[in-house]
Amino acid sequence: MSEPVDILLLGFGAVGVVYSYLLEKSGKARVTAVARGNFDLISKNGIRIDSDKFTPKIIEGYKPHRLVRSVEEAADTAYTFVIITTKSLPDILPTEAMLEPIIKAGKSKTFVLIQNGLGIEEGIYAATRAIDATILTSVCYISTNLVGNRDEVRFENTERLEIGVYHPPSEGRTLDTPLPKPTDVQTAALNQFAEIVKAGEGGIKLEEDMELVRFKKVVWNCCWASLACLVRAPLIDFLPALEFVGPSVLEFCNEVEAIGRAASLPLPPNFGKVIYQGTIDFRTKVGGKHKPSALVDLETGRPIEIEVTIGSILRMGRRVGRTDEQMTILRLVYGLMRVIQKVQVDGYAD
């Protein structure tokens, strides 16, 4: 059996804990986790994982192979992969700024983004051109939250990565534009990472058109997660009020779909309706009080991913010629979320 590879994980929240455990469970990786806000708590007692996916269901006191307080401390080792599971907050703390010690020291050539948002790769792609790094970008479908004193992870059985090699979007994309082809090095990195995830019983799907994949995911965050924040309620609480709010939520989803079509993304038919109805059907079937991560951030006084979800869609709409009148709900929601973000950032800074 080959020696496990070293992986650096930045962001030891609910998503980071699940993937750290999953990767180490594979037997193919050992994780160094940067625990910026909960180092003392985790280093002393570990973290409890209550899972519907893993066996055993309750994992007491989990700690990764190594736990460090900062990226600077982690820069003493070379890593096969650097995984980022932090919030994507380019308006507050860009990913490339957090990883500067690793990038400058050349401690890795492959960076894996497990983050929400559209266009989140641009900063780290630019920052790593000098070392010719591979950027693997992914969207994550997962139901997990930190609970208790942020010392327990509640993890439902929903977990899947859709991942591919990042290529800067081509200007003037059309439906007939050929997709860029990854190099052999990029393909090897993608396949190696997928092998580790699968060995840890994780769900993973390799994708070629990550701009499309990211757009499809960000529509959900843009439309549903933002509304959950505005009413401060989990999505299941929307169900009794659908008679009143449903038509406007559907209109919001359709408004965002129209932006993707204007950008020549090959979206499925009736995509806005699928996003709308799929969420309703899922929560009706599954139940539960799961909260979107944006709502958890709001409730815990943390900055929210505004610019890479709602803001990025609005800016895309303007680039492809959508008028303000064609983005009425999007503009309203973005404006209201910016008000909330200012309160969050001002309070977080205090």
Image: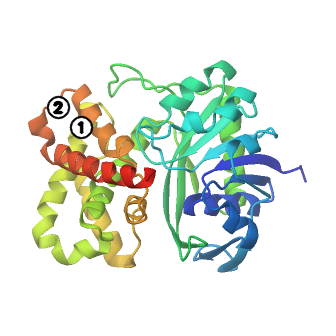
Q: Horizontal and vertical percent for residue 57? A: 65, 80
Q: Which residue is mark 1?
A: 259
The 10 Å Cα crowd at callout 2, few under 14, some 14 to 19, many 20 or more, is: some
Q: Residues within 10 Å of mark 1 (few under 14, many from 20)?
A: many
The answer to whether 139 appears left or right of 294 in the picture is right
Contact between labelled residues 1 and 2, with CB atoms less than 8 Å apart? yes
Q: Residue at x 16, y 74 (%)?
A: 241
Q: Nearer the viewer, residue 230 or 168?
A: 230
The N terminus, quarter of image: bottom right
Q: Which residue is mark 2?
A: 322
| In-front residue for pair 250/331 | 331
Closer to the chain start, of discs 2 and 1, is 1
Where does residue 221 sit, x and y in percent of width and height?
35, 53
The CA distance from mark 2 to mark 1 is 7 Å
Give the quadrant of residue 155. bottom right
> The disc labelled 2 sits on which kind of residue?
Arg
- Disc 2 secondary structure class: loop
Is 5 placed above or below 174 here?
Answer: below
